[in-house]
Amino acid sequence: MDLAVQFEVGAEETLGIYGPSGVGKTSTLRMIAGLLEPDGGRIDFGDETWYAGRTLTPPAARGIGFVFQDYALFPNLTVAENLRYASPIADDPYQDELLESFQLLGLSDQLPGQLSGGQQQRVALARALAQQPRLLLLDEPLSALDGQLRSHLHHQLLRLRKHRSCPTILISHDEDELRKLADRILVLHEGKVVFSGSPEAYFKREGQLIGYVSELSTGPSGMRLTVRLGSDVFTVDWPAAAPLLEVGVAVHLTFSAAGIQIEKATS
């Protein structure tokens, strides 16, 4: 599968990435973090160029907080020590705030091997935030938690974001989580972005609907359509090999967990 995605994230935006397994979601985050080198393209952060044909900024210099699916905690450090090691400020009171917010105060002296998967996941999230990152990458950060605790952490993340906001990219398979946390989502299918818009615009749709092309631009693998569907406006990619479209043309859109299928509407 060829991965070819193009997107921007606002300074205080949380961008969700949604789609089935194997479409390039985790690979996208790893490229941004500098842990996987792309074959081409570029990655910019503000005025900095991190990648442009070759790696220009090493991972450690990017200031990224990353919550991996396997947590990647330091096994020989306690919960509190994991946060302390990550923090740029010694004895930062923010560490205690994170321990309390993620219900970890009673576990601060425990080693990762003594914790459940859900507890380790909370430590990984708290550690990423303790870094006070310039960019936060979250790869299914709450997937190991039960519904009640997950809802509590949704609230805590939203609260913390008001005070210490940074651009965030969140991978999740949970529609409710994306509705609550993401300002905008990308839906990936076979390595391509097939939808960019609000979570509400995507998840409220069922079956096949008719939209109208309001703008055309060049995308990574063909045309990029801006489609108006009622009061919602979003973008989808239109393959180069597909029939040509013009502004004002009606299209059929079918929404599913696998992405969007789009075809020109027939009269």
Image (cartoon, grey):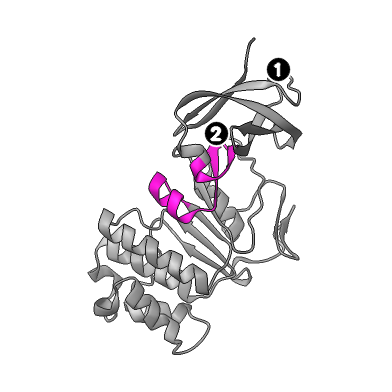
Range of residues picked out in magenta: 171-200
92 relative to 62 in the view: left or right: left
Q: Secondary structure at mark 1?
A: loop
Which residue carries the number 1 mark? 243
Q: Residue furthest front?
A: 231
Pointer 1 local density, CA inside 10 Å: few below 14, some 14–19, many at least 20: few
* Residue 191 percent across, percent down from the top left: 57, 37
Q: Residue at horizontal 29%, vertical 72%?
A: 103
90 is higher (above) or lower (below) than 256: below
Tell me which amino acid carries mark 2.
Glu
Among the 4 quarters of the image, the one containing residue 180: bottom left
Where's the N terminus, which quadrant?
A: top right
Q: Disc 2 designates what residue?
A: 190
Q: CA distance from mark 1 to mark 2?
A: 20 Å
Residue type at mark 1: give it.
Pro
- Location of the C terminus by quadrant is top right
Q: Nearer the viewer, residue 91 or 164?
A: 164
